[in-house]
Amino acid sequence: MVAMVNYYIVCFATSEAGVDLGSAVGRVLTASTASPSSSNKASSNFDSVAWIFNIISNSRMASKEFNVIAILHPKKGRTDIVLRQLKEVAEYVQKNEPGVLSYSINRSLRPSKDGEEEIIMLERYKDQAALKEHGSSQTFTAFNKKLAEQDLMRAPMVLKMVGEQGGFRSRL
């Protein structure tokens, strides 16, 4: 059995951002695994996440609105704990980050056969600067640190940056 690692790798997937994803993910993996102690791994990973936010913020999409889909994989029986912590982050974001246009916390309706659930975040940002501000906020980095320290996750968080291509957001 593979041991779970106490830190999380953030991956962005987009064709519009102009980011070499293979290189970005490789750097995150290298930085995240470079140090032997778990506290240093977590610290290295946060530095890597900041590096990814910086690269994305310098991309072609820097001034366009866009969406982020974040998929979190809590350990069985830990979903409610993660949801409570996310709600605290959402309250902070709503009060303090005007560049975050929406921040919706969603729980999978059907757990896996093993009872494992996913939390899916649907986020909309005014621009890349808003994402960078959110990703580097003390509240968000503290949340990520808690996920690692409390060993709440069964798999790394995955972030996908996406741009709308059609359809509609609301009938309101």
Image (cartoon, rainbow, N blue to C red):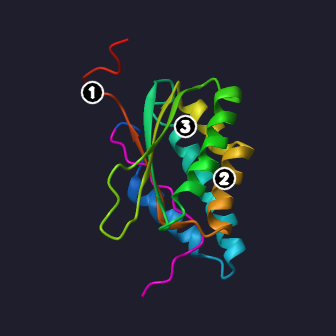
Q: Height in image: 23 above or below 58?
A: below
Q: Nearer the viewer, residue 86 or 123?
A: 86
Q: Residue furthest right?
A: 138
Provide the secondary structure element on which disc 1 rests. Answer: loop
Q: Quadrant of the C terminus?
A: top left
Question: Could you tell me if the residues under marks 3 and 2 are in contact, i.e. CB atoms within 8 Å?
Answer: no
Name which quarter of the figure residue 115 lies in: bottom left
Q: Height in image: 153 above or below 64?
A: below
Mark 2 Cα shell of 10 Å, populated few (<14), some (14-19), many (≥20): some
Callout 3 amino acid: Ser
Q: Is residue 111 left or right of residue 85?
A: left
**Residue 18 in view:** no
Name the residue carrying label 3. 57
Callout 2 amino acid: Phe
**Residue 80 in view:** yes
Q: Give me the C-alpha separation between circle 3 and circle 2.
A: 22 Å
Q: Is residue 44 left or right of residue 10?
A: right
Q: Quadrant of the N terminus?
A: bottom left
Comes first in the chain, label 1 or label 3? 3
Provide the secondary structure element on which disc 2 rests. Answer: helix
Q: Nearer the viewer, residue 122 or 163?
A: 122
Q: Is residue 3 magenta?
A: yes
Mark 3 Cα shell of 10 Å, populated few (<14), some (14-19), many (≥20): some
Residue range corresponding to the magenta coloring: 1-15
Q: Position of residue 127 (x, y in %)?
A: 53, 27
Name the residue carrying label 2. 143
In the drawing, what numbered circle is on residue 165? Answer: 1
- Please name the residue shown 35% across and 21% down the image: 169
